[in-house]
Amino acid sequence: MISCHRRTLVGELIVRAPGEGTYEIYRIANESPLQFVSEQSGHFNQSLALAPGRYLVLADCSSQSITIYPGSQENLLVHRLKFDPPTPPSPQDSFAIQCNQSEKTKSMQNLNNRYQLFLLHGKWDILVGMVPMRIDFTTMEPMGQSKDLTFKLAALQVAKSDQQNDATYFVSPVDRMIAATKYQHFGSWEFLLKGRYHVEVNGTTMEVALEEGEMRTIKPAILKVTTSESIDLTHPAKLKGSPWMVEINAGHWLTFNEPYPILPGNATIGINGSSQVLEISASEDQVIDLKARSIFVNSNCAADDIPCFGSHNISLYEPEEPYPFVETISDIPILYIDQSKPILLGVEGSRDITYEISPQVRDRQVQLGYLRLIPQPQHRLGQTTDLVRIITTGLPYRGHSLDINLENPTLMPLIEGTYKFEHFISTSGPDGERRGNDRLVTVEAGKTLELPFPVFISEKKWLSLKKSLIGPPEPDKVQAKGPANPAEKSKEL
């Protein structure tokens, strides 16, 4: 009697499925807030004895609540989903499914390399390789029977080459219905549903359309941007705080002198801090070796003069372009890629004077010297200095400086070489002519050449200047410093 009474206090649950497998079951102690008091595992197609009450049954990507009554048998139906890859999977290959297993428990499932799922009867949304899939068993005939559904997968891989280290590629759906991206190692298969996908490798992308059962292998190109062995790539980071990096497709960064796989197609290559870009076209298995050029502007600082290093702003220009494509500092290798045209180099402090570097030159070091221009005010009747400047004498030097300050000394950094010092004087009178005179000056690396020059000012300004000076020199002595007549001016300069 006792045994029969106990049997009437329990019920049974059978979860019917088209194959072997297990499910989880939780007893619900309270619905709000949701509380579980026990957990069990059951086997498909086998009876499970349960105490009367409310239960939550969990299978793959699905769940269902059920009430067990004393002495009753409850049945649930499970269906099988099969995903058929076009080639036998290896442990390195990847197939991913994501789903919400239960709204009640807010539980998610991430199923990796599972090619067979058992889902409870109902409507379910799953993410198969980043592609949303809705499965509705409630509309499938015949009703009341377990279903076996098979989906053929496609396979995608980016091939691995001998010139690269272990790397990953990224895959995402083209339609972007859901923001999902999957990564995979080169040489391994990614199994996906048919559809259109973006593939990304090191900032390069391409679109592929996959059909059921298709196997697609993409052979990457290899890109390497090299510098000369003599270039110290650690030096820029020490002075300007960041190293030179290769930029591909405006946003992805690569290191110099390292081989990188990239996808076939067009790409733009640049260097951080530079607006100059080089367009390339890559094909499968192609090896692209770009040779970076460099310029080093040496300020010739003393070894212990730390603030001197990097103290000059340097600009690089393309011919006929008004704005520089690189603005950086001295005393570091300045890197750029384009080898199709000459480059013009400018130094802050000698604006509009540039130095041309031929496209045939890969690495160039230039030396800075200094010109100290010292104005010396003088008065000469009817004569006024209206312009003083430094001009270049020919290639590789170009241009001329801005007007020199006529009141205070100017220290002008210049690339070593020979320049012209130009001095223009306007004369008063009915003709009001303007005369110019020039002389050659040679700037040597690491040296400062002092160049005093007369600045002829008006009588009014001269008298005002005399009043501001303590113990000004006699007018005849000041006049004696200059030439006796304008024709002798060239001897002084």
Image (cartoon, rainbow, N blue to C red):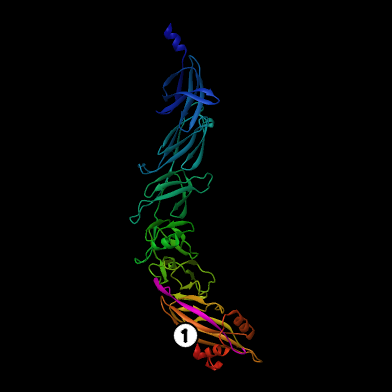
Q: Position of residue 167 (x, y in %)?
A: 38, 51
Q: Position of residue 13 (x, y in %)?
A: 46, 20
* Residue extending farthest right: 430
Above or below 93: residue 4: above
Please tell me which residue lies in front, 231 or 6. Answer: 231
Above or below 394: residue 215: above
**Residue drawn at x 45%, y 32% as measured from the top left:** 60
Please tell me which residue lies in front, 252 or 17. Answer: 252
* Residue extending farthest top: 1
Magenta stretch containing residue 83, yes or no? no
Q: Which residue is mark 1?
A: 440
* Residue extending farthest front: 471
Q: Position of residue 147 (x, y in %)?
A: 47, 31
Q: Please report the bounds of the magenta region as a residue range.
A: 358-382
Which element type, helix, strand or loop, lies under badge 1?
strand
Classify the position of the N terminus by image quarter: top left
Magenta stretch containing residue 364, yes or no? yes
Please tell me which residue lies in front, 327 or 421. Answer: 421
Question: How would you classify the magenta stretch by its main secondary structure?
Answer: strand
Above or below 329: residue 44: above
Above or below 489: residue 79: above
Dot 1 alpha-carbon crowd within 10 angstroms: few under 14, some 14 to 19, many 20 or more: some
Instruction: Give amino acid for label 1.
Output: Leu
Residue 245 occupies quadrant: bottom left
